[in-house]
Amino acid sequence: MAASAVAALSFPLRAAAAEWARYGSATIIDGLGFPGGWNTGPAGDSLTAGQLRDVADSGLSCTHLTLGEVGSMQPDAAYAAIMDSVAFWEREIAAHPDVLSPVRSAADIESSRAAGRTGLIFGLQDGVAFETDPDRLAVLQHFGIRVVQPTYNRRNLLGDGCMEPADAGLSRTGSACVEQIGELGMLLDLSHCGRRTTADALALATRPPAFTHTGCAAVTAHPRHRTDEEIRRVADLGGVTGIYVMPYLSGGRQPTAVDVIRHLEHALDVAGEDHVAVGTDGGISPTELNPEFVAGFRKNIEDRRAAGIAAPGETETGYLFASDLNTPRRFETLGGMLLDRGHSETRVAKILGGNLQRVFAEAWA
């Protein structure tokens, strides 16, 4: 479909999307997500039987999973938290081999799909753990880390995140770490990086990079969103831009499937169908909007503000899921909606997994 044809399609979308017959056999990848959901208990709780059923029902071949913590933390504490997360998820994989599998290579993605399991790709959203000791990157790679973001929203010793007003770019150490990420064969993820940090990192990239979970600044202005120039540059390097399901897509209100499709189609116009994906930044299990969740969500927003890691537009009612995508098979719903919009099955298969599968293979080679 030509860009002009995409632009000509009108909103609103109809709520009941057509079924996608190929969903069950396609490679479906969430660029950022996790087993469980926003109603999940504190870190360290094992997955429940219901959450495991949701994973099994989701149709996901794999998901990129964040390990450790983000934000202001001492390097040793951040490193320890990552190792704790590795141990936790390795135990979960070992306990549920019929549902979960580890992904450390491109072949593992295909074997997970063929076996009907969901593979877990370990990733980091902050470089604090290795900001004072870049040699830790090789250790993290050994323990299965395959995706690395140099910064979260704030500044660390590697560079500036997207919420830093100075926007100072990569430090010398940050530049060395970006180069090392490529040499070790890990995917360079720039989703939370500042504009200059992103530009500096892309100038050093030797393998396809990614924005695994973001939105389009041209559609909704926000520091977490990427400009057309950035999206195009990542595509030129062979990478992908993944659209998330976050209130930033919609100016702070709870997002809908329409918001996700709007950003996906803009990214398609800018980058082309080989360079767009979906990274929900959410749990596989549906969210139950009960009083406990509402109170916990409000507390989380308050804590993020107090820690200085909150982004503009984070509100107490801007929930991090779309009510019309509040199902383990949300990718199937998005696929049907894209088909309804006139996108081809080939294009839909690329957006919902094929493009990320290619980029993972090239970044990890």
Image: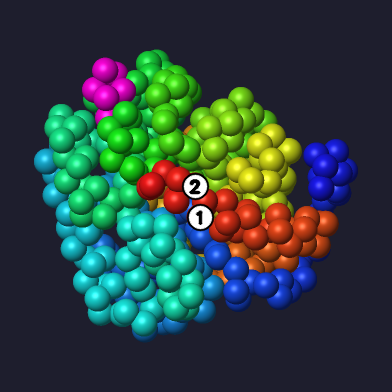
Q: Report the span colored magenta.
A: 171-177
The answer to whether residue 246 of the structure is visible from this angle is no
Compared to 274, does 323 lie above or below? below
Residue at point 72%, 45% (across, down):
265
Q: Amino acid at mark 2?
A: Val
Q: Is residue 22 magenta?
A: no
The CA distance from mark 1 to mark 2 is 6 Å
Across and down, in percent, residue 301 comes to 40, 47
Across and down, in percent, residue 148 comes to 34, 42
Name the residue beneath numbered marker 1: 357
Instruction: Please state which of residues 185 and 318 is positioned toward the viewer in this rendering.
Output: 185
The answer to whether residue 76 of the structure is visible from this angle is yes
Q: Quadrant of residue 308?
A: top left
Q: Amino acid at mark 1?
A: Gln
Across and down, in percent, residue 136 comes to 16, 40
Residue at point 27%, 73% (across, down):
92
Name the residue beneath numbered marker 2: 359
Q: Quadrant of residue 225?
A: top right
Mark 2 burial class by Cα count in 10 Å: few <14, some 14-19, many 20+: many
